[in-house]
Image (cartoon, rainbow, N blue to C red):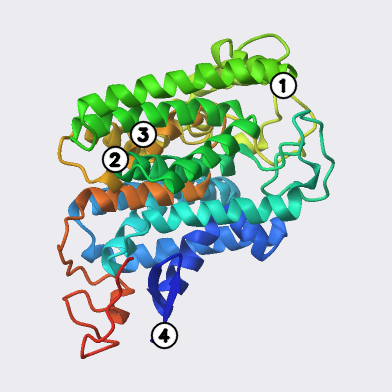
Amino acid sequence: MNRVIKIFGYKFYLKELLVVLFTYLLMENIFSWLVLPNSIILLTFEKVMSLIIFGIVLYNFTNLKRNEKIYIGLFTFVVLRLVFESLFKFGKPMEELTMFTILFPVVFTIYVKCISRSLELNLLEFLAKFYLLIYVVVMLIYGRGFSFSLASVDMDDYGPFSGDSRIIHARSILMMIIPFLWYFSEYLRTFKTKHLLLFLFCLVVILIHQHRSVWASSVFALLVFMLMSLRNSMISRPKFFYTIVITIGLIIGTGIVMSQVAPSFMDLLTERSSEIVHPTREGGTGEFRELQRETYFQLFLKRPIFGWTFEGFEMPNPLVDWWPPMTGQHFHEGYMEMLFYEGIVGLLLKYWFLLYLSYKAFSKRLSREAVILIAFSLSGLVFSFSYVLPLIFWGHVGLCLYYLERKPGEEYNEQFVFQEHFALDGTSNLYPDNSLIKEEY
C-alpha cells in the first residue's frame, strides 16, 4: 500500500489515490459512468458515500478549523431538524434522503478542503488534464451521434447525457471551464503554442455543445479571471489590454470567416445565443424556467425560512404531469430548488461559500491556482440560474478554499482521519530516509 503511482505527471501514494478517487473524483458523473454505466447504482453510491463522508467529518469535528466547525454545526442543526420533522410526521428518521443530499454539498466542500490540506494536495493541473482526457474518452465511446441539430435521443438510462445530439449534459461540460482557464493562464505565463492549442480546444468544446448556460458561465469566468489576474499582478496592464484587443480581433475575424465558409453554423450560434439576451423568449427553454421560477417563488413565500421540506415531495407538480408522483418537483434552477425545499436557511448555507469567494475575489494576494478556481467557482452563480450544480462542483469549491489558505512551504498539523497514513512534517512515514517524497512535476 506504500506504492507511488504517477498520473498526468502527479505522484500519488496508493492510499492517497484511493481516497481522492472514491471520495472525490467518482462524484464526477461522466467519469463514474465510464466506471459503471448504471444510474441507479451510481446514485446509490453517491448517497451512501455522502453518509460516509458526513460521518468522517463528524468523527474529525474537533480537528476542524473554527469556521469549518460553524458550517458543519449549522448543517447538523438543519439535518437534525429534518430528522425530528420526519419522525413526527412520518414515523421514520428521514422520509426523503434527498432532503439530506441536496444540502450535502456544504459537507462535501469542507471535506475536500480538509483532505486537500491533510494530504497536501496540489491538484489543479491534474484536474485540467483529467477533464480533457475524460471528455475525449466519453466522446470516442458515446459521441457517434453528435450533431448540431439538437435532435432528441431516446435512451434507457440517460445518466450524464443531455438526451439530445449534444451528447453530454451541461453539468459536465461546465467542468471544462477548469482546463479552459488553466491553459489560458499557462499561455499567458509562457506563451507556448501547446497551451494555446489546448485552450482553443477547450473553447471549441464549450462552443460546439451549445449549452447556453455554459456559454454564459464561461464568459463570466473568463472576465473574472482576467480582472483578478490584473489585480494580483499576474498579468501586466499592457499585456491585459493586448490580450483583450487580440481576443476581440480573433472573435471578429473568426466570425467573418465562418459566415463565409459555414453561414448555417453561424446562424445556428446566433440563434442559440440570442436566448441568453432574451431568456424568456416564447418557445424557448428559458420560458419554462421563468414559469417554474414564478410558480415556485409564490409557494416559497408561504414558507420562506425552512421551506416545504418533505411536503414538497408529496405535492403534485403544478406545471407538468409527466413526472412520477412522490418524486419531487424536478427543478431546473439551483436557487429555486433550495428556496422551495430548504428555504432561506438552506439557500444561504449552501451558497455561502460562493458569496465568500465573491468577497475574496477582490484580494490582491492570491495564488494563480486560487485565481483560476475562484473564477470557476463564481461561474456557478451564473449556472445556477439554469441548472442545479452537480456535487463535484462543490468539491472543486472545497479545493479552491484550500488554495486560498495554502501558503508555499506551509505545513499542517491537523490530524484528519487520513493523515495517519501520510507524514506532513517534512518526513515520510512511508519512506523514512526521504528517498522518495511526493512532488508535482
- Nearer to us in this view, 361 or 8: 8
Is 52 displayed left or right of 354 in the figure? Answer: right
Q: Is residue 103 visible?
A: no
Q: What residue type is labelled 4?
A: Arg
Q: Residue 262 carries which label?
A: 1
Quadrant including the C terminus:
bottom left
Query: Which numbered disc flags the more N-terminal residue, 3 or 2?
Result: 3
Horizontally, is 382 left or right of 320 in the view? Answer: left
Residue at far bottom of view:
433
Choose mark 4 or mark 1, whichever is in front.
Answer: 1
- Looking at the rendered image, the disc whose residue lies closer to the viewer, 4 or 3, is 4
**Tag shown at residue 371:** 2
Q: Which disc number belongs to residue 348?
A: 3
Can you tell which of label 1 and label 2 is closer to the viewer?
A: 1
Disc on the earlier residue, 1 or 2? 1
**CB atoms at circles 4 and 1 under 8 Å apart?**
no
Residue 3 circle label: 4
Disc 4 + disc 3, Cβ < 8 Å: no
